[in-house]
Image (tube, coloured by chain):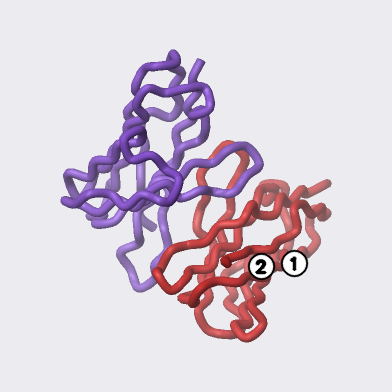
Chain colours: A purple, B red
Amino acid sequence: GAVVSQHPSWVICKSGTSVKIECRSLDFQATTMFWYRQFPKQSLMLMATSNEGSKATYEQGVEKDKFLINHASLTLSTLTVTSAHPEDSSFYICSSKGHGDLDEQFFGPGTRLTVL
Amino acid sequence: GQNIDQPTEMTATEGAIVQINCTYQTSGFNGLFWYQQHAGEAPTFLSYNVLDGLEEKGRFSSFLSRSKGYSYLLLKELQMKDSASYLCAPMDSNYQLIWGAGTKLIIKP
């Protein structure tokens, strides 16, 4: 399967600061990447779909000015949480679409964000 | 609307067999995925069904009935490391995965 990495694995920041999370596909070119958020004991929530070289498509209810997504290359997508608040504390996970016959998604290890 | 229904939690014994059921309603259908998610980790892909029937992959098998909007994941020879949440995720007409909260499987010795 494809390998997807995320950095950092966890981050603690002060309220009002911005945090950037990187998602890299290590062994294939990902034209499409997905950003999810998951609160404890809840389902994955798709935040946005990111296509290389174009603007991300955000899900309803997700503020595009708060969650900035950049997919500048086929191997890197970044999510920046701007002016983070404690309610943004969550597990952020990226995934890339598989390059085989299936449409499975390969997930990065996730980034746990804690905003104080 | 789109909906996934799975049991919240199940308990099974090491070495036994367990079946996790999933019913779904989606706008269109392009297959159904099962993922495993250990606590604090990201999901990992287990299986994919797009046609009716059973797909077997080692200790894990997945079944699909499109007419009934029903799937199950069968885990055999349970091991302690199988303790995790199992996520049923159908893909809708826009090729978007629809996620439920998953089933937390607890394995006891």
Q: Is mark 2 on a helix, strand or loop?
A: strand
Image-based side of B17 in relation to B39, left or right: right
User: Label 1 lies in what chain?
Assistant: B
* Residue at point 41%, 54% (across, down): A106
Residue neighbourhood size for the residue with mark 1, other residues' Cα within 10 Å, grouped as few (<14), some (14–19), many (≥20) = some
* Alpha carbons under labels 2 and 1: distance apart: 6 Å
Instruction: Kindly identify which residue carries mark 1.
Output: B19
Same-chain status of marks 2 and 1 = yes
B11, B97: nearer the viewer: B97
How many neighbours does mark 2 have within 10 angstroms: few (below 14), some (14-19), or many (20 or more)?
Answer: many
Query: Residue B104's spot in the image, x, y percent?
Result: 71, 50
Give amino acid for label 1: Gln
Residue under the point 55% across and 63% down: B89
Q: Which image quadrant is residue B93 in? A: bottom left
Q: Residue A71 carries which label?
A: none
Residue B61 in picture, x, y percent from top left: 63, 71
Q: What residue type is labelled 2?
A: Leu
Closer to the chain start, of discs 2 and 1, is 1
Q: Is residue A73 above or below residue B12?
A: above
Up-down: is A95 above or below A13? below
Instruction: Please give the name of the residue rendered at 61% of the width and 56% of the height, measured from the top-left corner.
Output: B100
Local secondary structure at mark 1: strand
Reading the image, the residue beneath label 2 is B73
Horizontal relation, residue A73 to residue B12: left or right: left
Q: Are the residues at dot 2 and dot 1 in contact (C-beta closer than 8 Å)?
A: yes
Q: Where is residue A22 in the image (x, y as percent from the top left)?
A: 31, 35
* Residue B74, x across and y down, in percent: 69, 68
Name the residue at 79% across, 58% down.
B15
Nearer to the camera, A90 or A63: A63
